[in-house]
Amino acid sequence: MSQPSTLHDLIRTLIAANHILHHHNIVDGFGHISIRHPDSLKETYIMPGYLAPALVHCADDLIEYHISDGSPVDPNAKKGYSERFIHGEIFKRFPGINCVIHSHSEAVLPFMIAGVPMRPAFHMAGFLGTEVPMFDITKLYEPGDQQDMLVNNTKFGSALASHFASGTANLTSPLPDHLVVLMRHHGFTTLGESIQDAVYRAMYTQTNASILSTAANLRSSFHGSALLREPEAVHGSDGSGLDLLSASETAGCRNMNEATADKAFRLWVREVEVLPLYVNELAEK
Ligand SMILES: [Zn+2]
């Protein structure tokens, strides 16, 4: 996949990605996307300050943070997101990841609340893999902590980042084993080697959740109690009676997803370019 090569191009794409994620209800007034600084020697990342994603419009809206501890490079930087530690700790754990997205998607949240596993329901969501981990911050709270679900320090961020790896054998891997982690009572986080990859995964995590919810409701309505009598499933299913992607289909679709993410991204950029709500001062005229 082609990737912007200069900081200017990356920031232009980052601003566009903020608008895309808002336009498609991945984020509202909250939620955020970040990029690793392209100069690897800097060991910093860049994300919007405390500003609704739809309103991000220029480089001055962004803040650069140290990956090591989440502190701003400019000590006088404007207010930032308390949840920037989601991003910094993922960049720290996975050197091959260059973009992180955090969302409170209303389509995804019911899966954690209902205790229903997220599985790929169609070919555009093969990147979900055969397991989508769930992060439960509650287990990390200590007496006196404000239990607001926010990942607002390096301890919580590091624990979330660890959920993208399958186990200790992958501690040194530059890339994660999982591309999406659900967050109990909160939302989800995804990532990518490029902005385009991460946006694709955020978009189709939400779409997959909607399709899976519709299918589950449809099957329940149509079959009713038959679901209880026939737990054995059609191929690829997990016993729910839903016809989900099999493991081999999931792997094949993931490869296809990674080869095609940039095509959709060009459409999504154009969609927000023509809407007056979204202003990108770095956009090509
Ligand atoms: Zn959040």
Image (tube, grey):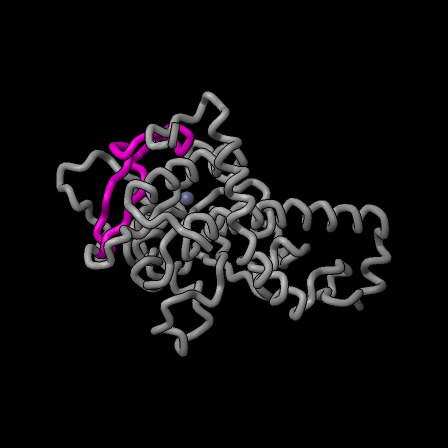
- For residue 91, what is the image quadrant? bottom left
Q: Position of residue 193 (x, y in %)?
A: 41, 57
Q: Residue at x 50, y 54 (%)?
A: 182
Q: Give the extent of the magenta segment.
A: 43-67
Q: Which residue sits at x=56%, y=59%?
A: 127
In this view, 35 is above or below 16: below
Q: Nearer the viewer, residue 240 or 70?
A: 70
Residue at the extreme left of the image, as rendered: 75
| For residue 11, above or below residue 183 | above
Up-down relation of residue 199 to residue 16 (above or below): below
Q: Inspect the magenta stretch and tell me whether residue 93 lies in it.
A: no
Given residues 145 and 194, the one toward you in this image is: 194
Where residue 121 appears, as percent x and y from the top left, is 68, 55
Q: State yes or no: residue 61 in magenta.
A: yes
Left or right of 283: which side holds 251?
right
Residue 144 visible? The answer is no
Residue under the point 46% across and 51% down: 198
Report x, y in % for residue 245: 69, 62
Q: Quadrant of ligand 1?
A: top left
